[in-house]
Image (spheres, helix red, strand yellow):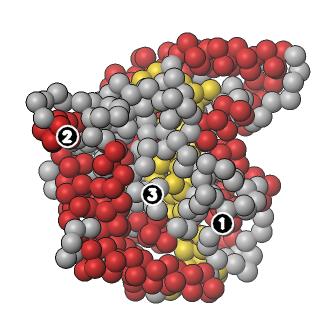
Amino acid sequence: MKKQKNISIRSLHEGLLNGEFTATNLVVDFFKKIKKDDKKINAFISLCEERALIKAGEVDEQIKNKVKINLLAGIPVAIKDNLLVEGLKCTAGSKMLTNYVAPYSATVIERLEKAGAIIIGKTNMDEFAMGSSGETSNFGTTKNPLDQKKVPGGSSSGSAAAVAADMAVFALGSDTGGSIRQPASFCGLVGLKPTYGRVSRHGLIALSSSFDQIGPLTRSVEDSAIVFENIAGPDNFDSTLADEDVSVLSHLGASLKGQTVGIPKEFFVAGMDEEIKKKTEETIENLKSLGLKIKEISLPLSKYSLAIYYILMTAELSSNLSRFDGVRYGFRADNETLLEMYEKTRAMGFGDEVKRRIILGTFVLSSGYVDAYYRKAQKVRELIRAEFKNAFKEVDYIITPTSPCLPFNLGEKFNDPLTMYLSDIYTVSANVVGIPALSMPIGEIKNLPVGLQIMGDFYHEKEILNLASQIEKI
C-alpha cells in the first residue's frame, strides 16, 4: 500500500472495505515509518509489532468473511504510556516503572480493541504526566516533528508527536491541566478533553484524580468524534461516570445560527504572543459567517485557576504517588533498613519534577497549612465552577487561545519551573471546572501551528465538536 499523508479514519475504513489494502498492509506500513523516523522524534517508548499483526489478521479475516466492522477496525493507534494494556510494559515515563507489565487493560483500551483498533505502541510522556514540554521523561526528550528544535508540548508529548509525524492515525492521551490540548496546539492537531466523568479512568495511572481525563489526539474533528464515541460512556469500574448519551458524529454539521460565543476578556491580556492574539481574533471574526453571535464576557475568578490547580493537583499526586515505595511493584533500591529502602527508592526512582511536586503537595496537606491552602483552594474551585456555570447561561461556547505562546525551544524553560507552569494558563480552567474543551489548529505563525480552544458546558461534547468541525471548514 502506498502511504498517504494526513489520512483520515473514514478514508482508511473505506479503503479496507474496498480492498485497496489490508489491515496487515496498513500496520506494516506504520511500523516501517516508525522504525525509519522515530529515532529522531522519540515518540514511542515501546512497540508491540507481533501483537499488532495478529490483531490486523483478525480484522482482515472479518472483512474477508463480510462481517460488519467498526470505523476503527484495523486503524493503528498509539497509546500514552500511563494507560494499562494487558501484557505490555507501562512505565508512565518513569524509572520507577521501567519494567512494570500491566496485569489488565484500561477500560478505554478494552473498548478500542473491541472496536477493532490496533495498538502499535506506547508513547513517550513527561514522567507521571508531570510536564508541559515532553522533557521530563526517563526515556529521553520527545521532539516536535514540525520543528525538531522545538518541544511538542506535554505531558502527552509522544502521542501528539506520533500523530503529527504520521506514525499513528490517532492516539490517546490524558489531560490533567492541558496535557492533551497543549501538545495538540504545538503539533497542529485536534485534541479533546471530555467532561470529567465522560470517559472511564479505570486503568489510567493517576496523577490527580479529580482533574485527570482521557481523550483523543487526531488529525481532524471528525476523527476526534469517532474516537470519543467509542471510548466514552458508563463503566462499573469508575463511579464518577455519568450515564449521558455519547452520540456526537450525527450532530456534526448542525446549524449554529442564533448561538452565542463568549470571549472572556481575562484571557486576552498582556503576556500573550501578539501574533497568536491576532490570529485568534481573526478566527473569532470569521465565526459571524456561521450565524454565531459574539459576546465579550468576564470570568474574573479564572485568574486564580492556575494557582488553584497547582495546589490541588500537587496535593492529590502526593497522595497517589505514595504507593510507589519499592515494596509492591516497580523499582526498588536495596538497603539495610526498611526506612532507608523507602527513602532511596523514591530518591532514585523519581525525577526532579516529580519530587518537586510531591514536596509541594505534601506541604499544602501538612498540619498548619491544610486549612490555609488545600481547603481554601477547594472553596475557590467551587466559586470558579459556579462562575463558569453562570457564563453558560449567557453563551453556548467560550473561546480562547490554547497556549499563550508558540512551541518553544528544547531546553528553553526546562530549568525554570514557574515559567513552564504558565504554559498551562489557558487550559487549566477546564480541568478545574470539569467542562469539556477542545484545541484545534487555526493556522500558522512562522511555520508553527496555532491552536484555538473551545470550551462548552458540561456534557456538551457534541456541541463543541460541531462548532470545531465548521471552523475547520472555513
Mark 1 vs mark 3: in front: 3
* Rendered position, 387 above or below 30: below
Label disc, if present, on residue 342 of the rendered structure: 2
Relative image position of residue 443 (x, y in whole percent): 48, 54
Q: Residues within 10 Å of mark 1 (few under 14, many from 20)?
A: many
- N-term-proximal mark, 1 vs 3: 3
User: 335 or 166, which lies in front?
Assistant: 335
Distance between the Cα atoms at labels 2 and 1? Answer: 42 Å
Callout 3: helix, strand or loop?
Answer: loop
Relative image position of residue 115 (x, y in whole percent): 72, 34
Relative image position of residue 427 (x, y in whole percent): 42, 64
Mark 2 vs mark 1: in front: 2
Q: Amino acid at mark 2?
A: Tyr
* Callout 2–callout 3 Cβ contact below 8 Å: no
- N-term-proximal mark, 2 vs 3: 3
Callout 1: helix, strand or loop?
Answer: loop
Distance between the Cα atoms at labels 1 and 3? Answer: 19 Å
Residue name at image x 52 percent, y 41 percent: 203
Q: Amino acid at mark 3?
A: Ser
Tell me the residue that label 3 is attached to.
209
Judged left or right of residue 125, residue 172 is right
Label disc, if present, on residue 459 of the rendered structure: 1
* Rendered position, 446 above or below 279: above
Distance between the Cα atoms at labels 2 and 3? Answer: 24 Å
Q: Quadrant of residue 108?
A: top right
Q: Is residue 19 at least partly visible in the picture?
A: yes
State the quadrant of the C terminus.
bottom right
Residue name at image x 39 percent, y 76 percent: 378
- N-term-proximal mark, 2 vs 1: 2
Callout 2: helix, strand or loop?
Answer: helix
